[in-house]
Image: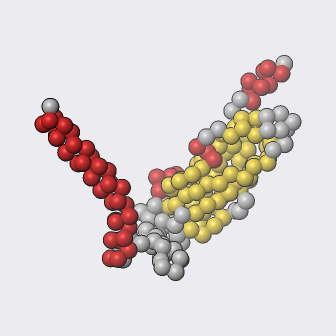
């Protein structure tokens, strides 16, 4: 029995030491990194030192023309007609939609690209087209698209068009129910 108690005591000491080691690991790691000057994003003066995006190809500029088409009860447009983008640069553009009816509508946006070969190089990070949009009566909404153009885009492509068509999803069901 005494041997079991002795073993239990040793196991408790080991468990406490392991917990203490795990608890102290984070502050010790931070201190070591600070002393060695590695893995620091905040400088001693409080400013943030973020590395630049080395994937941006600043030697090329692509013109992205923004287009919008509406098939349903709303006004839909891009807030700007075109913009200049460097391949690899993260860009945000905004589309605006206004439901001009006195009823709630469900809609979905579908993108298209011209020339079509650009589609494989156009990388959306966030887009209103990823999910269905529900617009209340007379509601206006600004919807962002966050994207970048893959630097592997062929060099001969200087301009392309990003177009969204906004469709009503359940318009036929609502019209049938109203009859």
Q: Is residue 140 above or below residue 160?
A: above
Q: Is residue 90 above or below residue 176?
A: below
Task: Tell me which residue sits at (64%, 59%) in the image.
Answer: 93
Q: Nearer the viewer, residue 92 or 41?
A: 41
Q: Nearer the viewer, residue 179 or 134?
A: 134
In percent of width and height, residue 50 lies at 48, 72
In percent of width and height, residue 147 lies at 55, 58
**Quadrant in which the N terminus is drawn:** top left
Q: Is 159 situated left or right of 155 in this image?
A: right
Q: Residue furthest right?
A: 102
User: Splitting the image into 4 quarters, where does residue 78 fall?
Assistant: bottom right
Q: Nearer the viewer, residue 82 or 106?
A: 106
Q: Is 107 situated left or right of 112 in this image?
A: right
In percent of width and height, residue 99 lies at 80, 42
**Quadrant in which the C terminus is drawn:** top right
Q: Is residue 2 above or below residue 36?
A: above
Task: Tell me which residue sits at (69%, 33%) in the image.
Answer: 169
Q: Is residue 123 above or below residue 166?
A: below
């Amino acid at each position: 029995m005494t041997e079991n108690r002795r073993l239990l005591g040793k196991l408790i000491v080991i468990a406490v030491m392991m917990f203490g080691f795990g608890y102290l690991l984070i502050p010790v790691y931070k201190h070591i990194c600070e002393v060695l000057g590695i893995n620091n994003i905040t400088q001693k003066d409080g400013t943030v030192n973020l590395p630049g995006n080395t994937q941006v190809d600043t030697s090329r500029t692509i013109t992205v023309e923004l287009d919008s088409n509406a098939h349903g009860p709303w006004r839909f447009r891009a807030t700007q007609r075109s913009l200049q983008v460097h391949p690899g640069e993260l860009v945000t553009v905004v589309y605006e939609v206004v439901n001009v009816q006195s009823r709630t509508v469900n809609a979905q946006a579908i993108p298209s690209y011209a020339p079509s070969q650009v589609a494989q190089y156009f990388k959306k990070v966030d887009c209103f087209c990823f999910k269905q949009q529900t617009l209340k009566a007379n509601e206006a909404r600004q919807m962002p698209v966050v994207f970048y153009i893959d630097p592997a885009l062929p060099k001969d492509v200087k301009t392309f068009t990003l177009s969204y068509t906004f469709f009503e999803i359940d318009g036929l069901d609502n019209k049938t129910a109203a009859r």
